[in-house]
Amino acid sequence: MSEFQDKVDNIKKKVSRTSLYIGRIPEKTKTRFIEVANTEFVEDYGLCLKYCLEQSIEYQKVKKQLFKLIEQNDKNL
């Protein structure tokens, strides 16, 4: 294998470990995500995605607790 091909293969390995390609994103969602990443995360899409995922998980936890409180309140009425 040539030295050039070794370099290409090495770059491919690095990119494949850190890259994420998502093909089916609604256009408005993609545009909004890019806007948020550009303004809030200095164009760092990875950090923006991490933040969105963490917020989603936290929201699910809070929502679950809220529904439990509502259910308990309904039982006490």
Image: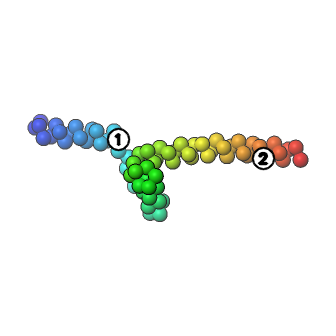
Badge number at residue 70:
2
Count of numbered tags:
2
Left or right: residue 10 versus residue 23 is left
Work out which quarter of the rendered image holds the N terminus and state it.
top left
Q: Position of residue 65 (x, y in %)?
A: 71, 42
Secondary-structure class at tag 2: helix
Q: Do we see residue 25 in this rendering?
A: no
Dot 2 crowding, Cα within 10 Å, few <14, some 14–19, many 20+: few
Residue that appears at 47% across and 43% down: 50
Badge number at residue 10:
none
Q: Position of residue 76 (x, y in %)?
A: 88, 43
Q: Quadrant of residue 71?
A: top right
Whichever of labels 1 and 2 marks the residue nearer the N terminus, that label is 1
Amino acid type, residue under disc 1 in the picture: Thr
Farthest residue toward the left?
2
In the rendered image, the vertical position of residue 19 relative to residue 1, given as above or below: below
Q: Which residue is mark 1?
A: 18
Left or right: residue 35 versus residue 5 is right
Work out whether residue 40 or residue 25 is closer to the camera in this orientation and state it: 40
Secondary-structure class at tag 1: helix
Q: Do we see residue 44 in this rendering?
A: yes
Residue that appears at 66% across and 43% down: 62
Q: Position of residue 11 (x, y in %)?
A: 23, 41
